[in-house]
Amino acid sequence: MFYLLLAIVCSALIALIFKYTENAGTNRYVITSANYFIAFMVSLIMIFSKKLLIGLDTSQSFFKEVKLLNSGYVFSPYSSIIWGLLIGVLFGSFFFLSFIFYQKSVKENGVSTSGAIAKLGILIPMIFSIVLWKEIPSPLQWLGLSLALVSILIVNLSEKTFKRLHLNLGLLLLFIFGGLAEFSSKIYQKYALSEYKDFFLFTIFFTAFIISIFYTKKTKAKIAKKDIFIGFSVGIPNLFSSYFLILSLDTIKTAVAFPLYSAGSIILISIGGYLIFKERINTNAKVAIFLTIIALILINL
């Protein structure tokens, strides 16, 4: 649970940093590129500082090991690196696409509706983990994660949001890409050694950086020092939110971890907004905080 709490803190820090800079006339595409740049650079530094490539046995066949996965086999160090590189490229694109469709959805559907759909994307890793790997929560955990999901809806949705909530392709793609991006941590952790997660994280953020740079150049965005600085400050907690989430999945079931991760981030953002920016915590947020605390207690019983 300690690693999950660290992941929640890092996730909340991202939103609070953006809140601090929201009136600074920033360019979100430059910030995104800088964020991904610092994230993959820190991952690369961690790879070399941990000497993960020294003494690596490359004699084992990755494809032979893939055939053993159905029996509960976990990749060797070398195959863990290959696995991280392969799925990192795939899910790195989902990271960026979820960002693009979130921005598009905010413009078309409003921030509340978009936020709710993005957060509910956690249903994808939850369902996959239950169906594919039989990670079924206990009855008390079911009750706890249900309360966590309810708290996510309460804090994001209002009467006005419900009126605007209707199925469209943009919202559907936001839900899918956001959920698949969240699922990346689980699919790496399930089959690979967590000691080599830095290769996976490096590949995800490097892939997202390349796509982001292309998109930034296409929009002809002006590059300002403050945007780069903000991107760097966001990139560190962005990296470590995924880093600690992977570690937490070694001991916490996916169907439990993801609702707590999402709900906990929302609650911490609300509390941080109150303490730092003197924002009033509305009734919805208070109810959500209460439900999340109850959910934490039930899940840990």
Image (cartoon, helix red, strand yellow):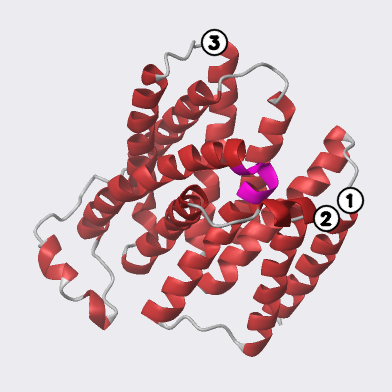
Q: State the image coordinates of residue 1 (x, y, percent, origin top left).
A: 63, 66
Q: Nearer the viewer, mark 2 or mark 3?
A: 2
Whole-Å distance between the Cαs marked 1 and 3? 36 Å
In what element is the residue under mark 3? loop
**Counting other residues with Cα less than 10 Å from the Cα at mark 1, is it few (<14), some (14-19), or many (20 or more)?**
few
| Category of crowding for the residue at label 3, using alpha-carbon neighbours closer than 10 angstroms: few (below 14), some (14–19), many (at least 20) | few
Asked if residue 210 lies left or right of residue 268, the reply is left
- Residue range in magenta is 109-114
Q: Main secondary structure of the magenta part?
A: helix
Say which amino acid is labelled 1.
Answer: Asn
Identify the residue under disc 1. 282
> Compared to 82, does 19 lie above or below?
above
168 magenta-colored: no
Between label 1 and label 3, give the one nearer the viewer.
1
- The amino acid type of the residue labelled 2 equals Ala
Q: What whole-number distance in Å separates the C-alpha atoms at marks 2 and 1?
A: 5 Å
**Of residues 229 and 152, which is closer to you in this image?**
152
In the image, is residue 110 part of the stretch drawn in magenta? yes
Residue 293 visible: yes
The residue indicated by pointer 2 is 285
Find out whether the residues at labels 2 and 1 contact each other: C-beta distance under 8 Å.
yes
Q: Is residue 252 visible?
A: no
Amino acid type at image mark 3 = Ala
Residue depicted at 67% across the width and 68% down the height: 149
Residue linked to disc 3: 224
Q: Residue at x 70, y 26 (%)?
A: 22
Marks 2 and 3 sit apart, C-alpha to C-alpha, by: 35 Å
Q: Quadrant of residue 14?
A: top right
Name the side, left or right, on which 241 lies relative to 50: right
**Residue 225 point in image, percent of width and height:** 55, 11
